[in-house]
Amino acid sequence: MAIMVPVSFDSENTPPGEQKVFRWLEQGSGDWVIFHQLDLAPWNGNRKAEIDFLVLIPDQGFVVIEVKSHPKIYRDNRGWHLGNKIERSPLKQADDAVGGFHRRKKQQFSGGALEHIPVVRCVIFPEADFEVSETIEWRSWEILDRRICLQSVHAKKFCDLIRTCLFRTIEASPKLKPLGRIMTKNEIQAFKDFIRPVLKSEPSIRELRKRRRDEMDSLLREQQKPILQMAKINPRMLVTGAAGTGKTLIAQELALQLAESGKRTGLFCFNRGIGDHLHKFTQPKLPNLVTGSVHSILCEMMDITISESADSDYWNCEFPRIVTEKMNNDTLTGECSFDCLVIDEFQDFLIQPGLLDCFETLTKGGLNGGNWYIFGDLEHQVLGREYHTETFQGQKNRILSHRPAVYHLRENCRNYEIVVSAGLACCGLEGIYDGFMRGKGNINYLRLVPVKPGNFRADCLIKSIQSWKQNGVRDKDIVILSGIARAQSTVATKLNGQIAGLHHIRQKGQGIRYASVHEFKGLESEVVILTDLNVRVLDNDINVLYTGITRALSGLSIVEDQDFLQRMIEPLVKEKGITS
C-alpha cells in the first residue's frame, strides 16, 4: 500500500472522482508517497493553483495529477466542455501546477541533487468517456478517461499507468532527464517535510484550530460573537462600528474559518499598514487564504508594474481599468477570483469607486450573487475630503442594494474612556459607544503637552516621550502620529538625529515609530503621541483627530500649540476633571 498524506479524505468536500482516484492510488507500491489536495497559492503569486494528487515515485520522480469528476467532458473549437460549462483546459491547469511546484522545489533544494528531479503532468477523467487520441496539445498517455481507468483497475494495473506516464514523458522530453537512481529515505523525508505545510487537511492543525477558536471565544464580547454565527447562514454581510469595536479581530477570525472550510478566501484592506498587520497576524497560514492590501495583492496576482510617477488619477481610474481588463481573461479569472472576500476598513474602498468594481470582479458571483463580508466605520473614519460625498454615498447605496445582513457594533474594546472621551466631544461624536470594555482608566493616561510661543515642537515631543519612558513604557510601544497626510513632512522626521532607533512604521526596527494618522488607520499602539493637529487640518477633516486618538491602547499625548489646546481641547478635558 502506498503512503497517503493525509491518510484519508473529507468525504463531504472531496469530489467523487477524486475519491475514486484516491482509492486506486492507495494500491501503489509501498515506497510511493502520495499527497492529496495541495494548494499552491503562496508558490504561484497568490493565484489559485491546486494539485489534486502529487505522486512521488522514488526511482523516477513526481507526477502531478489533475482530476475532473464531470460525467461529460469533450473538447471542440470553443474550448473544453466540463459538464455544462466551458472551462479552462485541465491540461493547462496541470501545467501550471507542475510549473509552480517545480519552481518552488528548485528554490527549496537549489544546488542539490533534488533540484532536478523530474515533474510531469497527468489528467484523469474517472467519470467520463473521452477520445484520447494523441493531438498537438497532449500525448495519449497523459489523459486517462473512465474506460482506461476501469480496465486498469480491474487488472490491478492502475498505478502502472501512472508510472508509464512519468517514464514516457521523461523519454519524450528534451528538458527532462531520468533520475537514474532510487531516492534515499532521507531525501524522501526531506520532500515530505517540505510539502506537508501546504496540505489543506493536515490533521495536526485541528487541535491548533480548536485552541484558537477557544481563545477567540474568550476574547469576543457578547455583542461581537453573533457575527461569526451569522456569517454561516448569510452569504453577504456588512458589519459597521466605530473605531475600537473589534472589527479587524472578527474579520481575521472569519477569514480563517472560511479558508479552513476549504474556500479560497481573500482578506483585504486598503491601507498598506493594516495589510501588513493582517498578513503577519492571521495564523495559521493557510495556502487558500490570501491576505494584504488590495493594491499589492492585485499587482502580484496580475503582474501589474506600477510606475514611480503614479498619481491619484492613476489609482482612482487607470489601475481599476487595468484590473478589469485583465479579469476579462478567462484563465486569469479562474486563477485570481475568490470564493469569499472579507474586506476590512471598507470605507476606504468607497472613496475610490473603481476599487468597488475590482471587488466585484474578484468575487465569484459578483456583488449580487457572491460571498462577501465587509467591515468598516462608514461614518467617522473616512479621512480626507478630496472625495465627493455624493460618490461615497452612491457607492454605499450600491452595496446596500445587494441586501447584505447588517450588524452594528457599539462597544469599545480598545480604549480607556478617559483617553478618548474629550476628543470625541471635540469632534461632536459623543454617544457613539454604548460602553468601554476596559473601563474609565486613570487620569494620567491622557497628557496634554502645549507648544508655547518660542518653543520648538521637537523639544516638546522629546519631553512627552521621556515622560512615558519614565513610567516604564518601552520604545517599541510608542508611536508618533501626525495629522498631516504625508509623514515625511511632519516634525517626527526632524527627530531622526535626536532619538536613537526612530523609524517609519514601514521600516523594520525596535525603536519608536512614526507615521501619519492616515497611514496608521486600523492599527493600534500602547502609547500614541499626536501632533500636527492644527486648526487648518481639523477644519478640513475632523475625523483625523477622532482616528488618531482611538489608536491608543493605554496612553495618549497631544502635542500641539498652546492656543489650540486651550480653544479646542482643554475646556472639554477640564469638564472631565482632567488637567494638563
Image (cartoon, grey):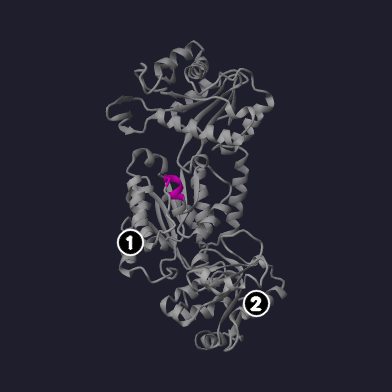
The C terminus appears in which quarter of the rendering? bottom right
Q: Is residue 269 left or right of residue 570?
A: left
Which numbered dot is residue 395? 1
Q: Residue at x 60, y 50 (%)?
A: 212
Q: Position of residue 532 (x, y in %)?
A: 52, 77
Residue type of the residue flagged with mark 2: Ile
Q: Residue at x 47, y 13 (%)?
A: 152
Q: Position of residue 230 (x, y in %)?
A: 45, 54
**Residue under pointer 2:** 462
Q: Is residue 402 above or below residue 175?
A: below
Q: Is residue 89 left or right of residue 569?
A: left
Badge 2: residue crowd in 10 Å (few <14, some 14–19, many ≥20) = few
- Callout 2 secondary element: helix
Q: Residue furthest left?
A: 77
Q: Tell whether position 298 is magenta.
A: yes
Spatial CA span between label 1 and label 2: 43 Å
- Which is nearer the N-term, disc 1 or disc 2? 1
Q: Position of residue 41 (x, y in %)?
A: 49, 41
Is residue 294 visible in the rendered structure shown here? no
Magenta stretch mostly in which secondary structure? helix
Q: Residue at x 55, y 67 (%)?
A: 515
- Callout 1 secondary element: helix
Q: Is residue 260 above or below residue 138?
A: below
Q: Residue at x 64, y 34 (%)?
A: 193
Q: Residue furthest top?
A: 155
Bounds of the magenta span? 297-303
